[in-house]
Structure formats: structure tokens, C-alpha cells
Image: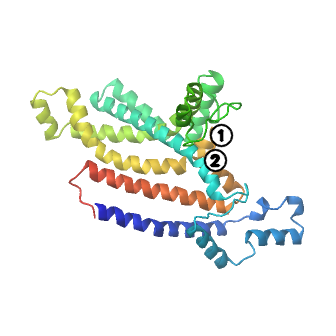
Amino acid sequence: MLAYVLRRLIAIPFLLLGVASVSFFLSQMTKGDPLAALVPEKMMNDAEVVAAVKAEWGLDQPLPVRYVTYLGNLLHGDMGTSFSTRRPVAVDIAERLPATLELVIAAMILGTALGIGLGLLSARFRGSVTDGASRIFALIGSSLPIFWSGLILLFVLSVQFQLVPGTGRLPARVDPPPHVSGFYTLDSLLAGDWALFGQSLAHLALPAFVLGWSVTGIVARLVRSSLIEGLGQDYARTARAKGAPERVVLINHALRNAMIPLLTILGFTFAYLITGAVLTETIFAWPGIGSYAVRAAGSLDYPAIGGVTIVGSIAFLLANLATDIAYAWANPRMKVS
């Protein structure tokens, strides 16, 4: 297993090189002029200004030269400078990544817990009204587009009934907690500010639910089918023959086996949510890398787009590796090759 993990870790830089290369050339092939983000519109006809800006940002260099320069900077941890913010892309992403991770982790916890619970209810009361209601709720979560469910829930719960706060990570006039991890909920706890913890948790609840609801449907369907299959296996019949209650058979025996395929789904889902939180962050004005990527794409900010792509790829590769390790841990009979 250790040799397998080392091989995967060694392969990651080469995979990232491929991702960075493809991202660079695709960004160069898009239609549009990045100078629009660098030069004021009224000065676009000034040839000297345009030439100076091109020279400053290296846009006057041939494509192969820019590519080699880009890879060379990446090897030194430099993702370039954002056209929009005029700051290093790595700094921009480092500031926004904790917000995205806090949202995605909360969504994963909510979505997974809710999905497992609904899957258990559906399998335990198969064919009943409870089973139908659970399946419908899970189906709606996985079928509704996030932008639609997000807007509807935001309007109903926040605007109409004021049950949850609106957009953002905190109220507009509230200062964030002292920076430790970048997670407002955790940092406010570390600061001992319970009022701020409550506010940050309240602001996190709705976007995390909207994002996690899409996970709930996948998890619930997988857990339900795995449990129903497991309850018909020999080990379940043996447990019943020994006098174990159906609840014990369901949770202690069938659910344990259902967790193995679930680990694979959760690993890929976590990586998907990091890069797929774009819509949720945009709807709820959540200052993460998703909203940063949207602004970068709108202004043809190539360095920022490339930086977000690389971070998303790293998340996907690490989540994939963690999934394989967890799978081998949960199922020791699996042979790693």
C-alpha cells in the first residue's frame, strides 16, 4: 500500500503539468482580448499605452515563450498576477480557499448525514410512505439545479420568512474573527466569541444545505440499494438467526458493508463540490474561489483561471488518493495495483 501511495504522489506533479498546459493553451484559444481588463476603454486607441501594457504583462511575447515562462513560474510556486486584482493569484486563492473549504465541508457533512439517514429509513421501511417520501426528497435534491433551489430557498427562508440570514459569511457591519484557519465558525470558537459563532453558523447553514442537498440524493440512493442488497445476504440471515433485532442487523451489519462503495462516491463528490461550488457562492455572495473563478472568466483573467484550475485539480487528485486509501482500509481484502 505504501508503494502504491508513493507512486500516486510521484505522478501528481506530472498530472498537474498536463493540466496546467491544457489550461494555458485553452485560455489562449478563447476569443476576446485580455487587454480589456488591463487598459481603460478610453485609452485602447493609444498605441503607446497598449504596447506598454503588453510589454508589462508579457503579452507581446510569442506563445511558446509565454508558455515556457508560465511553467517556469509555476515550478517556483508563482501562478502569475491577476489582471483584475493586480495581486499574485496564489495570494488571492489563499485568501478565498478557506471560505470554499468551510462551505464544502459543511455541505458534505449535511448531505452525507442526511443521505445516510434517508437511505436507512427507505431500506428499513421499504415500500411504505416513509420510503416514498424519503426517495422523493432525495430525488428532488439531486435533480433540481443548484441555482434554482438556491434562489427559491433564499427568497422563501430569508426574504419572506426571515428564518435565516441573507448572503455573505457575516452581517455587513460585523468584523470577522481573528484569522487562524480562515473558517469563521472555527475561528470565532477559538476566539471564545459565541455570538459571532452563532452568526457565522447561521450564514453558513443555508448555502451548505443547498450545496449538500445535491449530495443527499446520490448518497441516499446508494445507501438504500446497498442496504436492501445486504439485508438479503447470508451474514444478515445469520445475525437474525442469532436473535439480533432488525435494527442491529441494519446498522451493525448491512450499513457497515454499504459504507465501502459509499467511500468512493464521497471522495469524488468532495472534489466535485470544491470546483462545483461556483453557483452556490455566486448566489449567496460567498467570497470563495468559485466566485473568484466566475469574475476571472468574465474578465478573461488568464492567470486567475489557470490558478483556480490547478487548485481544483490538486483537490481532485488528493481526494481520489484519499478515497483509494480509505477504500483499502475499509476493505482489507482489496488488492492495490
Pointer 1: what residue? 285
* Label 2, residues with CA under 10 Å away: few <14, some 14-19, many ≥20: many
Residue 323 visible in rendering: yes
Would you identify the image quadrant in which residue 119 lies?
top left
Direction from residue 9 to residue 16 in the image, left or right: right
Q: Residue at x 39, y 46 (%)?
A: 266
> What amino acid type is highlighted by mark number 1?
Ala
How many neighbours does mark 1 have within 10 angstroms: few (below 14), some (14-19), or many (20 or more)? some
Q: Nearer the viewer, residue 162 or 124?
A: 162
Give the vertical position of 175 relative to 271 (above or below): above
Q: Which mark is residue 291?
A: 2
Q: Quadrant of residue 114?
A: top left
User: Given contact means CB atoms under 8 Å apart, are the residues at marks 2 and 1 in contact?
Assistant: yes
Looking at the picture, how far across and down is residue 295, in whole percent? 68, 51
Q: Identify the residue at horizontal 70%, vertical 65% (top origin).
A: 31
Residue 271 against residue 59 in the figure, above or below = above
Query: Relative to 263, is 73 on the left or the right?
Result: right
Up/down of 47 relative to 91, above or below: below
Quadrant that contains the C terminus: bottom left
Q: Amino acid at mark 2?
A: Ser
Q: Which of the two residues, 111 or 84, is positioned nearer the viewer here? A: 84
In the image, taking residue 300 as reference, residue 275 lies left or right, namely: left
Q: Is residue 203 left or right of residue 137?
A: right
| Residue 299 screen position, x and y as percent | 72, 57
Of 286 and 257, the residue lying toward us: 286
Q: Secondary structure at mark 1?
A: loop
As helix, strand or loop, the secondary structure at mark 2 comes to helix
Residue 29 to residue 307: above or below: below
- Residue reaching furthest to the left: 241
**Res 134 quadrant in image:** top left
Residue at 74% of width from left, 64% of height from top?
A: 34
Give the color scheme: rainbow, by chain, secondary structure or one colour. rainbow
